[in-house]
Every structure is written in C-alpha cells, then in structure tokens.
Image (cartoon, helix red, strand yellow):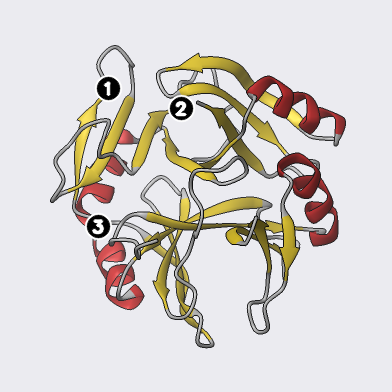
Amino acid sequence: MADFAEGVPCWVDCALPDADAGRRFYGALFGWRFREPPGAGESYAYVGPHPVAGLYRKPDGRLPTAWTVHFATPDAGRLLARAVAAGGTAVSGPDVIGERGVRALVADPDGAVFGLWQPGTDKGFRELTAPGAYAWSEVRTRESAAVDPFYEHVFRYVGYDVPGASGERLWSPEDSGPGVDTAVLGRAVLAADDVPVELPAHVLAQFRVGDCGKAVEAALRLGGRLRDGPRATPYGTFAELADDQGAVFGVVAE
C-alpha cells in the first residue's frame, strides 16, 4: 500500500505496565500475533502478514497507560516545531529509532497526546480493512475552541461539522476537501454531563471487529471494562473499552 500523506494516522502503539499481559489480552481479543523486530523497542502486532499496532512496557510507572495515535510526516522536527508554535507542548523527541524512523510526541492545547512519525524502513500500518486492523481516531476534548484551530493549522486540515451530531467535527487533508468520504480524523466534545471530570483529553484509537457485541463480551471475559456502548453510529456499531490494565480504545463493526 502507498505511504501515508502528512497528517494521516499511520501507526498506533500502547504503553503498558505489563507488556506480556497486554499481548495476551489483545492477542485473544483481536487474534493478533506478535513479533519483536530488532531495534524496535516494542512488540509489533500482526493481522496475517501485516503489522497493525505496537505494544511496549512503560519505562516509567508514572507515565500513562494509554494508546498513542501517530500521524505521518516527512519531517518530524519541523512538524513538532509547528505544533509548539501553534500552542502545543513537546512531550518528547524527535527521537531517531535506528533506521526505522523518527518519532516525536506532542500534547495539544487541551493535553491530548499524539505522536508524529517520520518513516524510515517502518512505513506504518500495512493493513487497514481486516478485523483487528486500525479503523479510526477521534480527538476527545473539552476545549474545542482551542483544539480545532490547533489541528487545522498543524496538519492543514479542513473541517466539517457533522450535521445533527452535536460537538462532532471531521477533519480532511486540505487538498481533498471536507466531508465524510475524505476525513482522516474526528473530534468530539467531552460533555460535562456524560464524562467524569477526571477523564483527560485524549485521542481515542479504534479497531475493526466483525461483531461489536461479541468483541465487548470477549473483552469483558479477558478482564476489560465497558465504558460506552455498544451503540449504533453512522459509521457502524461502536463500543469504547478499557483493557485489563486500563488503556482505553474503541471497537467498531461496519
């Protein structure tokens, strides 16, 4: 498959206290198989022959247990500087990961952390359609007035407010025009009535499943927690889950 354009999600990985337990949980839930390429520093999850995600043990227990969505760029240093100038915060990097690529982590103006990935030998996802593959990402924020112009400036997105969906916005690359068919990222507002105040802003990674209800049942059997759903959306049946170590993610069945 072709390389990813700048601003398009190209990889997701998860920092966990216990990477072995994470491999057991996600392997059972999604059917992932794992390999650890030399120098990668994380286990790669595969659907068939294709890498779809990464898992690694947190180097510091104070770091959040969380999934991180990475956006493609030809120059991680340049884009990191652009993000900081737009009101974001540099969390780490740019870090050279051998020949695999260059990584930086950024927090948006509301504190949601995401990654920038400048590919070397690792181009990102190689499978996007099968069950267990990455499906979608959504920025969850309480500060849309600050966050919207940030993403639209940093990644040069054009925005589209979803009709009839209060607080939902879709972002598309500027050269493709706004709309559902061209969107690469969504934004939802964390409503005070529905979301605990202690839940921070975040970027929610979602994965494809064949049956959302069955995926939820499997996650619960494995020690996970249901946070939202399953519920019907215009894009399929969706549920938000936390794994058995607390990392939050979504599943969607079209």
Q: Is residue 79 left or right of residue 230?
A: left
The residue tagged 1 is: 162
Alpha carbon distance from label 1 to label 2: 16 Å
Q: Is residue 153 left or right of residue 81?
A: left
Give neighbour class at mark 2: few <14, some 14-19, many 20+ (Cα, 10 Å). many
Amino acid type, callout 2: Leu
Judge by depth and name the residue closer to the eye, 170 or 237. Answer: 237
- Label 1 to label 3: alpha-carbon separation: 21 Å
Secondary structure at badge 2 equals: loop
Could you classify mark 3 by the number of other residues whose Cα lies within 10 Å: few (under 14), some (14-19), or many (20 or more)? Answer: some
The amino acid pointed to by label 3 is Val
- The relative height of residue 195 versus residue 13 in the rendered view (above or below) is above
Compared with residue 211, is residue 164 higher up or lower down, i.e. above or below? above
Amino acid carrying label 1: it is: Val
Residue at 25%, 16% (x, y): give it: 163
User: Residue 229, image x and y in percent?
Assistant: 61, 18
The Cα atoms of the two marked residues, 2 and 3, are separated by 22 Å
